Image: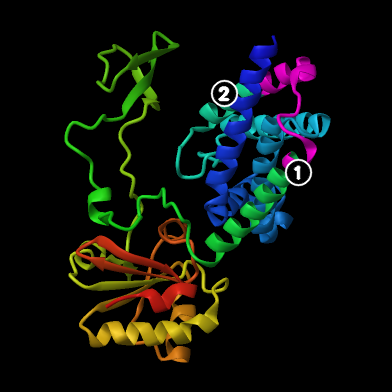
Amino acid sequence: MKYLIGIVRIFVGILFVISGFIKLNDPVGFSFKLEEYFSQGVLDLPVFEPHALTISLVVVIFEVLLGVLLILGHKRKFTLWSLLLMIVFFTFLTFYSAYFNKVTDCGCFGDAIKLTPWESFTKDVVLLVLILLLFYGKKYITPLFRPFVTKMIIAISILACIFYAYFVLNHLPVIDFRPYEIGKNIEEGMGIPEGAPKPIYEYSWKFKVNGEEQIIATNGDYPTVDGEFIGVETEEIQEGYEPPVHDFTIEQNGEDFASSLLQEPKLVMVIAYDLRKSNLEVFEEVKEVTDQALNKGYKVVGMSASGPEQTKALVKQYKLGFEFYFTDQTTLKTVVRSNPGVLVLQKGTIKQKVHYNDLDELEF
């Protein structure tokens, strides 16, 4: 039992550290996921939406800290109860989300590892069992180091988390797990490779035969039945390949210009997913860098989910030399974790991507 508890202790501790670090690498992205939970009927707590970023930072730093405490064997009672309460809460959350199909990705491992709601629930159940096992064998969880060394490691861990969070919030995630990382081609990301698996559907055909309703299941072919057709229900029983880049459009007046713009040899995108939440003062510097780009032959476009009244007012106020196009807000949030942020592309390939604090790093 002693060796089993030791293995489980290290496994669970490392898993919490890794899970927390991945989310700490992109706390803005995790805050977007929390907003979904708050607003889509899972927790039904819209009052917390404005505080999603703060909550995300507290949760991920605490998650990393619990993993470190468990590995070190420090504050055993506090650590085990905190782990138990956290996993019970998230097990309920993932079950509710999966059963009622509220949030399609739990965000447990950020964009690094995508889990379906049921996969997330299964993962939480396994962790719950392991944590209960740790409770059962808690007497075998002993400190690895002397108190002074343990406290030093904990202090360093907390300071490292705070520093790392501060850095990624004021710049961009150090590791970009999304399909819009530097070097990726957006148009290629929207394609479906030859031989990729296709979705499989099951069709339940309803007929009235001799006055009774009959249901016949097929893989799509209309069945030959001597009766009155009532209707058909379709169920996807196996998902097909989904391109990493989807719902990417660049619209203006109802027309999508994505294909043509992604062929531009020198293109700058200024992305502000919601101008109501943007740091508008930064647009003075945005004007400077985009004017430089325009003078060097770049085509510059703005991309936002805000309405034309807001975008036109912004262009007029800061005398911007480019127009805004409409793009889905979720897509823009995925492209860059900055509001606004700037991308430089060459025929659809992302060459540069910066936070508004790093506009001076752009090279044209």
Report if residue 263 lies within the magenta region.
no
Q: Are marks 2 and 1 in contact (CB under 8 Å)?
A: no
The kind of secondary structure element at disc 1 is: helix
Against 180, residue 315 (above or below) is below
Q: Nearer the viewer, residue 150 or 327?
A: 150
Is residue 280 at all visible to an observer of this figure?
Answer: yes
> In percent of the image, x 19 and y 69: which residue is there?
264
Is residue 314 at all visible to an observer of this figure?
Answer: no
**x%, y% of residue 358?**
45, 73
Instruction: Give residue 197's quadrant in the image.
Output: top left
- The residue lying furthest to the right in this view is 77
**x%, y% of residue 8?**
63, 20
**x%, y% of residue 109?**
52, 40
The residues bearing labels 2 and 1 have C-alpha atoms spaced at a distance of 34 Å
**What's the mark number on residue 151?**
1
Report if residue 131 lies within the magenta region.
yes
The kind of secondary structure element at disc 2 is: helix
Magenta stretch: dominant SS?
A: helix
* 319 relative position to 18: left or right: left
User: Could you tell me how many numbered marks the image carries?
Assistant: 2
Q: Which residues are magenta?
A: 128-149
> In percent of the image, x 68 and y 17: which residue is there?
5
Residue annotated with mark 2 = 122
- Amino acid on which the number 1 mark rests in the picture: Lys
Quadrant that contains the C terminus: bottom left
Instruction: Give residue 14's quadrant in the image.
Output: top right
- Amino acid on which the number 2 mark rests in the picture: Thr
